[in-house]
Image (tube, rainbow, N blue to C red):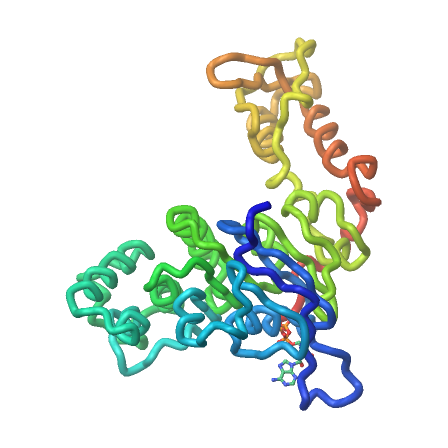
Amino acid sequence: MVQPAIAFEHVRKEYPTAGDRSGAAVDDLSLDVRPGEVLVLVGPSGCGKSTTLRMANRLVEPTSGRILLEGDDVTHVDPVQLRRRIGYVIQDVGLFPHRTVAQNVATVPRLLGWDRRRTAARVEELLALVGLEPSRYARRYPHELSGGERQRVGVARALATDPPVLLMDEPFGAVDPVGRRRLQSEFARIQREVGTTVMLVTHDIDEAVRMGDRVAVLSSGAHVEQLATPLEVVARPATDAVADLVGRGRLARLLALGRLTEADVDTGATGPVVGRVALGAELGDVLGAFLAAPGEGAGARVEVLDGDRVVGSATSATVLRALRRLTDASHGTDAPPLAAGADRVGTLPA
Ligand SMILES: Nc1ncnc2c1ncn2[C@@H]1O[C@H](COP(=O)(O)OP(=O)(O)OP(=O)(O)O)[C@@H](O)[C@H]1O
């Protein structure tokens, strides 16, 4: 088996100041983060997400249990070495206000004693990576940047020494919804490019399913309700708590996450052809092709292509069947019917 990038083994955290009434912030968490994946922790406020993240880089010490970074117990790693191996990005970024963008990004390389030339080259490379033209941004101060730009600098700074692991705590939380979308997809590109393992905390289920290779839905005490791919979490919530979180908007999420597979394709349909889609298209795009041809009736179909080859067609009934396949309880856990939770709120309060 591949060695996890981070492994939590029966980790528990009790805050001494929390008093008797509350249970442990993290009760008994065991979780592996695989190398190269984006693992998202999502759950309601106070369920222990940030505490979990901060134990990985020793901003918080566990009460018991072990955390291994690429096999090394983090409590045995020198904290300076540890921070070099783990980048950390938080909501308010925490840039040094009296240092320029370039100086902020150079923080860790300077601590590590890199020479001027190597540091400058790395800063330039990182600013370009996060989409900030070095000649325009390097000399600015944080107050001369937008929230989204500050967040990019935060990501560049966290990646400065090319750490194998990046921890992100509500990294896009302070950015408006449109900027947030853009940052999310840009970050996904950066992550693919550098291959860093990411553990990301959010309370926003949409962000979780958009960003995660896997999603861990947590409840109080960092109890893992479900740990699965975004599609599995949305299509087949394992518990009521997950169903509640996925709640309203579940159908829209399924249409975005679900894909047209070979098994869905119809080879006998004969209705009028209103468009073409590729095998593997998002189910929402398949439906969209019918919406774009409003004059056609229920028998209309789109041709399905595998490369250049037409392998069959899909009708609106095909999409329904695919949705049923995805949510079919016989494939996994007891999923509630698709309409369940339609009146529930998908995003929890911060
Ligand atoms: N320094 C601390 N001292 C005492 N209790 C704390 C401390 N930090 C967190 N807690 C408590 O531990 C629990 C988990 O907090 P944590 O910040 O990990 O949750 P979270 O899921 O990240 O929440 P949020 O989404 O609101 O940031 C909460 O009940 C919180 O009040």
Q: Residue 172 appears at what percent x and percent y?
A: 48, 64
The quadrant of the rendering that contains the C terminus is: bottom right
At x 53%, y 18%, the residue is: 305
Number of numbered discs: 0
Q: Residue 181 appears at what percent x and percent y?
A: 48, 54
At x 28%, y 70%, the residue is: 109
Residue closer to the observer: 55 or 199: 55
72 lies above or below 111: above
> Going by the image, does 266 lie left or right of 2?
right
Quadrant housing residue 265: top right
Quadrant housing residue 285: top right
Q: Residue 39 appears at what percent x and percent y?
A: 57, 55
> Going by the image, does 13 lie left or right of 303?
right
The quadrant of the rendering that contains the N terminus is: top right
Residue closer to the observer: 94 or 338: 94
At x 54%, y 23%, the residue is: 277
In the displayed orientation, state which residue is furthest to the left: 117
277 lies above or below 120: above
At x 19%, y 65%, the residue is: 120
Q: Quadrant of ligand 1?
A: bottom right
Residue closer to the observer: 254 or 301: 254
Residue closer to the observer: 13 or 156: 13
Q: Residue 233 appears at what percent x and percent y?
A: 70, 48
> Going by the image, does 135 lie left or right of 181?
left
> Going by the image, does 33 lie left or right of 11?
left
